[in-house]
Amino acid sequence: MNTATIWRSTLERLLQHESLDPVTRQWLQEAHLLASQTTEGGAHEEKESLYFSLQVHNDLARDVLTSHWLEVMEEALQEVTGRTIVLEVTHEPGEEPLPVQEEVATPHLAASTSAAQNGYNFYDRSINRSIPHKAARTPEAPSYEQNAASYQSFQAGVASQQEQWENEQRSGILTNNRLNPRYSFDTFIVGNSNRLAHAASLAVAEAPGESYNPLFLYGGVGLGKTHLLHAIGQQGVQTGLAVLYVSSEQFTNEIINAIRYRTTEEFRAKYRSVDILLVDDIQFIAGKESTEEEFFHTFNSLHEMSKQIVICSDRPPKAIASLEERLRSRFEWGLVADIQPPDLETRMAILRVKADALHYRVPDEIISYIAGRVQTNIRELEGCLNRLMAYQQLHRVDLTLDVARAAMSSLGADHRETHLDGRQIAQAVADYYRVSFEAMCSKQRDKHIVAPRQVAMYLIRQETQISLFEIGQLFGKRDHSTVLHACEKIERNLKQNPTLRQDVSTIREQLLRD
Ligand SMILES: Nc1ncnc2c1ncn2[C@@H]1O[C@H](COP(=O)(O)OP(=O)(O)OP(=O)(O)O)[C@@H](O)[C@H]1O
């Protein structure tokens, strides 16, 4: 890799630095990197060091870059070359420095893109000519001290402009955070299927950036991921934090526009000025290179500043195909929490809350009827309620079970009423754990029988309205307190045991599919 290529890659890194002011930026963009020498390191060094000289066009640039940026530049060069770097910043008066194109062995970056390939010209003489050289200074040209003083006042101006700019971004976000006030913690129903995700969201909302960062929530369609994101956001807003909710699609579009209209600085300033960043449907950024790249830098900046990041997806990080490894590992850094389809009891509770919010009086048997028809998507559950309301108003009839049936009749096979009975559920559990139904109903106390028996009792209790007594009868005439103990035990274990959660969810999905 030649020095021009090395500088090109290094410069890309340096230009992303948060605290880079416009003047230093310009100096860096106009600087030339030259390889000076290489030397064998001491006995304790693994690799030889690379010596570079960065040529700049005036003394002030040399001094500022040396005093403030030397370490940063050396680190960036080290990242690019994979070698230890010794860098010196020099001002070469008189002759403009010519690029040195010697090859430098940088094994791990041999295939890296070159500056020439990218069409980037570091030696643009039209730029260089506009920078006065010390040797060419005319009597009217400002002295070094004058330059330094004006640089300092410029710096102060830049800092206050920067502050003003960031404040503008912040207040823009504070007034336009895209949050839906309906999605709060108060209106979120907690059940076994979403308990962990809810608890983690609450913890994050109460102490952003302190508990789980990032928080990664995943689950199927319409199960409340967006609701939780918004709930975290509402709480943040109430405590005066700058919260931004964005779908990965919006994020991608904003990047495309920022690149097209050359407004990447504004884009970055906006995303880096938030206290809580909420990103929905992150799975859609997978495979979009520049979006992933930009998100990576946004993520790192926020994380370094202990700003909270919450991400949602329809699948866990591991299952997002073609997602860059560095992003995947960052997503798994904090806490990954799943949301499973809700059980019957939770579905009924959600319907009850939604009906109350609409001031719509719905008898329990109808709530139970609807909850039995839609098992895996809460959005559809809500849709059924709205449909029922519309149907009833249109036909001006009293709300009865028959009316509910008529209202739902055209919804199709996906919404058919389920008639799961206890035996069916017990059989599905027995099949899943590869034990016999008869063994589950017997007096056997072996662990491999007791565990499935308890899961079956729990699922029957959750998915049907069969009483504890009847469940006990089904499992070899056991007492109702045994059934209650089993249900409570499974409920407790579900909170701590992700494998059990997955097992129960798979059995439930299987039952509903069949
Ligand atoms: N536990 C819950 N309590 C109350 N309402 C809920 C709950 N879970 C989901 N909902 C409601 O269900 C609807 C769909 O939820 P949401 O949009 O959050 O789902 P999602 O998981 O983000 O779906 P998608 O993957 O399609 O984006 C919303 O109206 C939401 O309020």
Image (tube, rainbow, N blue to C red):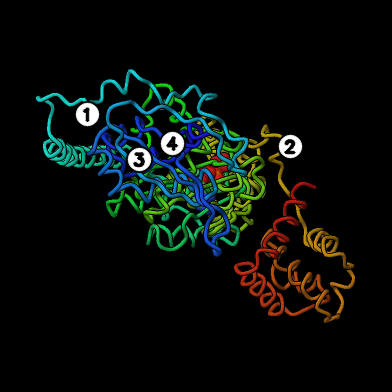
Q: Earlier in the sequence, mark 4 or mark 1?
A: 4
What element does badge 2 sit on? helix
Q: Which of 185 and 397 is in front in this view?
A: 185
Residue 469 located left or right of residue 277: right
Q: Residue flagged by tag 4: what amino acid is it?
A: Leu
Residue 54 located left or right of residue 410: left
Q: Residue flagged by tag 1: what amino acid is it?
A: Ala
Disc 1 from disc 2: Cα separation? 85 Å
Task: Judge: label 3 CB < 8 Å from ligand 1.
Answer: no
Residue 51 located left or right of residue 365: left
- Identify residue for label 1: 135
- Identify residue for label 3: 177
- Identify residue for label 2: 413
Residue 176 picture location, percent across and down: 32, 37
Disc 4 from disc 1: Cα separation? 21 Å
Q: Which of marks 1 and 2 is nearer the N terminus?
A: 1
- Which-is-in-front pick, marks 1 and 3? 1
